Image: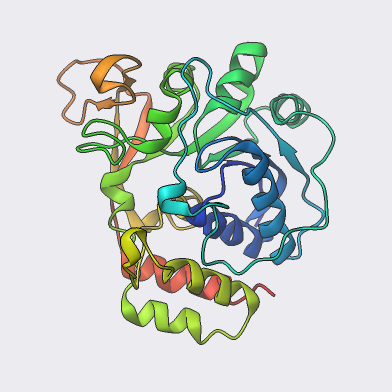
Amino acid sequence: MTARTLAIDTDPGQDDAVALLLAFAHREAFDVKLIASVAGNVGLERTTANALRIRDLAGRGDVPVHAGMAGPMVVPLETAEFISGPDGLAGSGLPESASRPADGHAVDALIRLIRIEPPGSVTICALGPLTNIAMALRLAPDIAPRLGLLSIMGGALSLGNMTPAAEFNFYVDPHAAAVVMSAGVKTALFGLDVTHQAIASPAHVARLAALGNRAGACVYGMLTRPRPGGMATKAHPMHDPCTVAWLMWPELFDGRDCHVEIETDGRVRGRSTIDWNGRTKRSPNAYVASKVDAGALFDRMIDSIARLP
């Protein structure tokens, strides 16, 4: 099996952390070339620090972390500390990293990677707002036909979680989402309708607690962290890991090819208009996932986390 060349664009975030750990756990499947941080769940300084914390937890100091865009292309940045906590990784128990990000901007690092690797060989898992990727496509349009695949957590077939219309990542930078979705790059989209199915059962949470490694304790803490208003939960939707899991286990997901358009303005800012039934007769620009076998997904993710320190 040849490992897939992978870059991860991320704004950690608890579920981002699990997606990163999942990719790090499978060296046979993924040759992770770089992590690009972007402002989203929290500001850029924290998302970059969190990427370093997660990388250190996985023992993957060989993977460079590049700091990227500190805000959206057009609109002001809105963050989600009300969900992720002040540092973005509430419940993780991770210490601050002693290491520093790599030299060079994340946008430049992404462009360079896509240009030096064979055409069609680079996959990007996009876990946060799409600002870095949109900027790369605008600055270097030659990379679009060279990029093999974008696996994106974003959008929704039905209701949003930031507004009635919009999912968080697309709401935070709708202009970037519009650039990326119109770039002609092969794309897989994992929106709220599928990611809200990816919830661990009490038995899965108990398995995490019993793993006995630091990665398992970290994920357990994030899944069971206190929530807004002092409430606690035994589960939390694992949005971002779906983008990585699908690359290894596509049989766990159902979906179809659709045309997706992003609204950038007004009360529907960030809405992903997904032509599920092909009414507009426009050519599909993304595979849109709609279902996931959550039980099998968490079984395999926990087995993966057990591989880590």
Q: Residue 112 versus residue 89: which sits nearer the camera?
A: 89
Query: Colour scheme in the image?
Result: rainbow
Which residue is at 63% across, 27% downward?
A: 69
Residue 143 drawn above or below residue 237: above
- Left or right of 138? Residue 163 is left
Q: Position of residue 55 (x, y in %)?
A: 71, 57
For the image, the number of numbered tags is 0
Which residue is at 60% across, 12% downward?
A: 138
Residue 180 drawn above or below residue 166: above
Which residue is at 76% across, 65% downward?
A: 59
Q: Position of residue 63 (x, y in %)?
A: 77, 50
Residue 169 drawn above or below residue 177: below
Tell me the quarter of the picture where residue 92 sits.
bottom right
Q: Residue 73 versus residue 43: which sits nearer the camera?
A: 43
Question: Would residue 144 be visible to someone looking at this image?
Answer: yes
Residue found at the very far front of the displayed protein: 229
Tell me the quarter of the image containing the N terminus.
bottom right
Tell me the quarter of the image containing the C terminus.
bottom right
- Left or right of 80? Residue 71 is right
Question: Would residue 3 be visible to someone looking at this image?
Answer: no
- Left or right of 42? Residue 190 is left
Tell me the quarter of the picture where residue 260 sits.
top left
Q: Residue 297 versus residue 169: which sits nearer the camera?
A: 169
Residue 166 drawn above or below residue 8: above
Which residue is at 76% across, 58% downward?
A: 97
Q: Position of residue 240 (x, y in %)?
A: 46, 50
- Left or right of 105? Residue 295 is left
